Amino acid sequence: MNETIWSLTSPRVKRISGSKDFHSSPQKDFCNKIGTKRTAIYLIPVSLLDNILRPLVMARGLDTPMLIILIGVLGGTVSYGITGLFLGPVVLAVIWELLVAWTRERESA
């Protein structure tokens, strides 16, 4: 009974019979660690560049300042995740355009 409890709490989970373990070979573990590091090395700069380039690309053709788009991207992502990444800048750009139109109307009146 002691052996069964140890086998369930051990980092290398063994079969109840104790004949073979489910853990992969050290060579596969080493390759998985290299693959994980390589993936992280590629994904971290890409995600950082994505946070900078997305507002620039989304701001093309708009009169909305890039700072408003960037705030919309960051705020939307923090608030609503992946959906907010796309909805945040749109909502903030519409609000900005309405605010600008409202102030122009007040100035002309």
Image: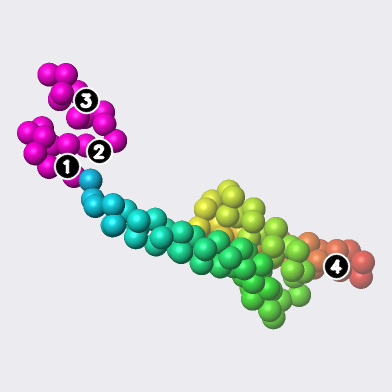
Question: In the rendered image, which residue does mark 1 sit on?
Answer: 21
Instruction: Indicate left or right for 91 with 27 as reference.
Output: right
Q: Nearer the viewer, mark 1 or mark 4?
A: 1
| Label located before the other in sequence (1 or 3) | 3
Question: In the rendered image, which residue does mark 3 sit on?
Answer: 6
- Residue at (66%, 59%) from the top-left corner? 72
Image quadrant of residue 30?
Answer: bottom left
Amino acid type shown at disc 2: Arg
Q: Which mark is residue 42?
A: none
- Residue 103 appears at what percent x and percent y? 85, 64
- Residue 11 appears at what percent x and percent y? 29, 35
Amino acid type shown at disc 4: Glu
Q: CA distance from mark 1 to mark 4?
A: 75 Å
Q: Are marks 1 and 2 in contact (CB under 8 Å)?
A: yes
Question: In the rendered image, which residue does mark 2 sit on?
Answer: 12
| Label located before the other in sequence (1 or 4) | 1
Q: Is residue 6 visible?
A: yes
Label 1: few (<14), some (14–19) or many (≥20) C-alpha neighbours in 10 Å: few
For label 4, the SS is helix
Amino acid type shown at disc 3: Trp
Question: In the rendered image, which residue does mark 4 sit on?
Answer: 105
- Residue 53 appears at what percent x and percent y? 64, 71
In the image, which residues are magenta?
1-22
Image quadrant of residue 18?
Answer: top left
Is residue 17 covered in magenta? yes
